[in-house]
Image (cartoon, helix red, strand yellow):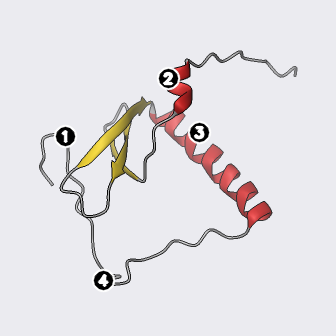
Amino acid sequence: MEEKKIQIDISPEVAQGKYANFAVIAHSANEFVFDMICMLPNGPKAAVQSRVIMTPENAKQLFFALQHNLEKYESTFGKISVRQPKDNPNEKITFLGPNGQA
């Protein structure tokens, strides 16, 4: 089977990207919603930088692609360690929905 090539265009504004260090993921029966957020240390608010909405099938394909790329990254650069907060490693983060409800 011949591999299909797709040409992807990207505007200069989108190519700049948005920094996100936090994500909130929600879903319904028909879609997954990914809010990519920039949360500054000790800031009173966090700003959503981008929202991506996908079908469940596309979300699963994204999961597999991310898993594959993380495996490739770790085989080249070493295992990624996930750090816990030093002051309270058991601290829990409450995720707020679009209407501010937990």
Q: Dot 4 corresponds to which residue?
A: 88
- On the image, the x and y values in percent for residue 22 come to 39, 53
In front: label 1 or label 4: 4
The residue beneath circle 3 is: 61
Farthest-out residue, right: 1
Tag 2 near tag 4, CB within 8 Å: no
Give the distance between the C-alpha atoms of the residues marked 3 and 2, in whole angstroms.
26 Å
Residue under the point 37% across and 77% down = 85
Observer-side mark, 1 or 2, equals 2
Q: How far is disc 1 from disc 4 in space, using C-alphas?
A: 27 Å
Q: Measure the C-alpha gap from mark 3 to mark 4.
A: 35 Å
Q: Return the residue nearer the eye: 71 or 46.
A: 46
Distance from the alpha carbon under mark 2 to that under mark 4:
39 Å
Please, what secondary structure does the residue beneath circle 2 have?
helix
Residue 2 visible in the shown view: yes
Q: Position of residue 29 (x, y in %)?
A: 33, 36
Which class describes the residues within 10 Å of circle 2: few (<14), some (14-19), or many (20+)? few
Q: Which residue is mark 2?
A: 13
Where does the image place residue 79, in percent across and percent down from the top left?
A: 68, 70
Q: Residues within 10 Å of mark 4 (few under 14, many from 20)?
A: few
Callout in the foreground (3, 4): 4
Sequence-wise, the earlier of marks 3 and 4 is: 3
Q: Label 1, on which residue?
A: 98
- Amino acid residing under circle 2: Glu
